[in-house]
Image (cartoon, rainbow, N blue to C red):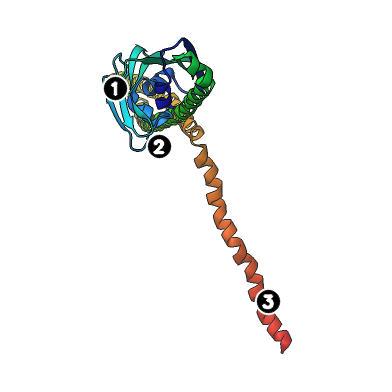
Amino acid sequence: MLMLLASLNTADAKKTLAVTKTQEIEASSELVWSYVSNFETWKNWTAWNVETDPDAVWTVTGEAGSVGHTSEWNGPELGEGKMVATVTEPNATFSYDLFFDGKDDKFPGGLTLAEADGVTTVSWDWNMEMGGLGAALFGKKITEMVGNDFATGLANLEVMVEEAAAAAALEAAQAAVTETVAANTAATEALTEAEAAVVAAGETKTAAEETASKARRKSDKAAAATALEEATAALTAAEEAAAAARTASEAAGTAAQEAQAALDALSPAAEEAAPAEEAAPAEEAAPAEEAAPAEEAAPAEGEAAE
């Protein structure tokens, strides 16, 4: 298709051919942009890929996402050509000029991204001027071919990006589980320590109460009263600390459960596989149970024969 485009750009009266294809991708525009703006990925998701021309050689230069970023290729199926980035607006616009066979004739195209509610709509536009005769004879076929290539590429892009988004979400969910479980463990340990402090403070108060009840001299009673007051205050503080630790532990436990639920929601295949794994032993055991009566019946038949 690329070689055919190059051969039909004649010098007679021109007509403009244009193609636009769109695709919705359930991912952020930032993630989609990382693929669209990097020519290194194009040979993986566009229709002009290594499967189409295994012998083609690609050379990518310049910084991805920047004006001047260039991809050049040469192969028996794709021919010789290059793309040069001309307009780059991060997460929004990536325009390029397409050239064939070292010629200066350029064919402009580009992709625009628009994100809403976590879904990015990608529009791929292309246009070229073709000689009137070429447009009349081959215009429809050319636009259909380009449109099919764009549709194929966008469909591949959707799969690649959504798989990457799912992998990133799963990784983040796994990290969240690890973090919240660690926080829950720490909160549980803190609660245990706080409850132990309450017990210790309670024992101290009990001892102070016994000392105060046994005090006879005025000075001893005063000292015992002060000690009991301090022990009571310490117990109150320990109980408040334990209550706070209990609240924190409950919150940490809830966070860990929610993180695990979020991880489980991203791993439906694992959940569906679990019942099948549990059911397997039961299915294997059934024939043995059914065989047992037959084995017991054999002697009875033998006795009957005697």
Residues tagged 3 and 1 counted as in contact (Cβ below 8 A): no
Q: Residue at x 61, y 61 (%)?
A: 286
* In the depicted structure, whether residue 262 falls above or below residue 17: below
* In the depicted structure, whether residue 177 falls above or below residue 138: below
**Between marks 3 and 1 in the image, the one whose residue lies nearer the viewer:** 3
**Total residue callouts:** 3
Indicate the amino acid at tag 2: Glu
Indicate the amino acid at tag 1: Asp
Q: Which residue is mark 2?
A: 51
Q: Give the CA distance from mark 3 to mark 1.
A: 90 Å
Residue 19 appears in view: no
Q: Residue at x 48, y 12 (%)?
A: 16
Residue 226 location, x and y as percent? 32, 18
Quadrant in the picture for residue 220: top left
For this rendering, which residue is in front, 165 or 267?
165
Q: Which residue is mark 3?
A: 297
Residue most extreme to the bottom: 306
Q: Which numbered circle lies on residue 291?
A: none
Q: Which numbered circle lies on residue 220?
A: 1
Q: Residue at x 30, y 21 (%)?
A: 102
Q: Secondary structure at mark 2?
A: loop
Indicate the amino acid at tag 3: Ala
Q: Give the CA distance from mark 1 to mark 2.
A: 96 Å
